[in-house]
Image (cartoon, rainbow, N blue to C red):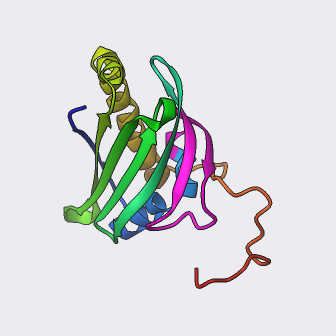
Amino acid sequence: MRPFTVQTSISAPREEIYDFVADLSNRPAYSDHFLQDYRLARANPVGAGAAARFKLKGPFGEQWGEIALMTCDRPRRIDEQGRIGRLGRITTHAVYEFVQDAGGVTRVELTVWTDPDKPFDTILEHLGSRRWLKHRTKMALQRLRRIFEEERDLPLARTTIAGYEPLKAARFGA
C-alpha cells in the first residue's frame, strides 16, 4: 500500500506527547476504536523493543496483528514495524514524527504503509482497507489530541501484564 500521512496539532510539549506515545501500554487510550484484545508482548512497554499484540477490526473482518517499536529518537520520532493478517503475511510500518511549532504547539504526523506478500492481500487493500485505515488513524490522532487538551473525569484506558507485580519482578536494569 502506498504510504499515507495523517496529522494533528496538540497544545502540549512534544516531550510529554512523545513519552505518552512511546509507552505501548497507553495505546488503548486513543486506538481502542479499531484495536481490540490489545495485550503487551513484553514486560517493559516503553522504548525500542517494546511490543504488543492486538485484533484489528477491519472492513473485511478481524485480523490479528503485532507491532514492535524499532527505533525511538526522543523527542522527534518513533518507528514501528509489525505484521498483520493471516499468518502475518502483511508487513506494516508506522512512523510518528513530533514537530515543535510556535506557541508551544506540537504537530504529530503519523505515516503508515504496508507491504502485502500475496496478490489477494493487495486486492483487499485496493478494495478499501487503505481508506478505512487512514480514517481510523486520523480518528486516533484526534483522540490523542483530546487526551492532552481536554479534562477527563475517568482515568485513561491502559494495558498491563496479567499477574505482573513490578515490586517483585526481577530487576535487570530496566
Quarter occupied by the C terminus: bottom right
Quarter occupied by the N terminus: top left
Observer-nearest of 147 and 85: 85
Observer-nearest of 77 and 87: 87
Q: Quadrant of residue 117?
A: top left
Vertical comparison of 172 with 63: above or below: below
Observer-nearest of 153 and 131: 131
Observer-nearest of 6 and 73: 73
Vertical comparison of 2 with 154: above or below: above
Residue at 46%, 37% in the rendered image? 88
* Residue 71 position in % (x across, y down): 35, 65
* Residue 122 position in % (x across, y down): 29, 23
Residue at 58%, 85% in the rendered image? 173
Vertical comparison of 121 with 78: above or below: above
Residue at 31%, 14% in the rendered image? 127
Q: Is residue 132 at all visible to an observer of this figure? A: yes
* Residue 136 position in % (x across, y down): 40, 31
* Residue 146 position in % (x across, y down): 45, 46
All told, the count of numbered labels is: 0
Q: Is residue 150 left or right of residue 162?
A: left
Magenta-colored span: 30-55
Residue at 47%, 65% in the rendered image? 49
Q: Say whether residue 126 is magenta.
A: no
Vertical comparison of 47 with 41: above or below: below
Q: Is residue 13 at all visible to an observer of this figure? A: no
Q: Is residue 72 left or right of residue 44?
A: left
Q: Quadrant of residue 72?
A: bottom left
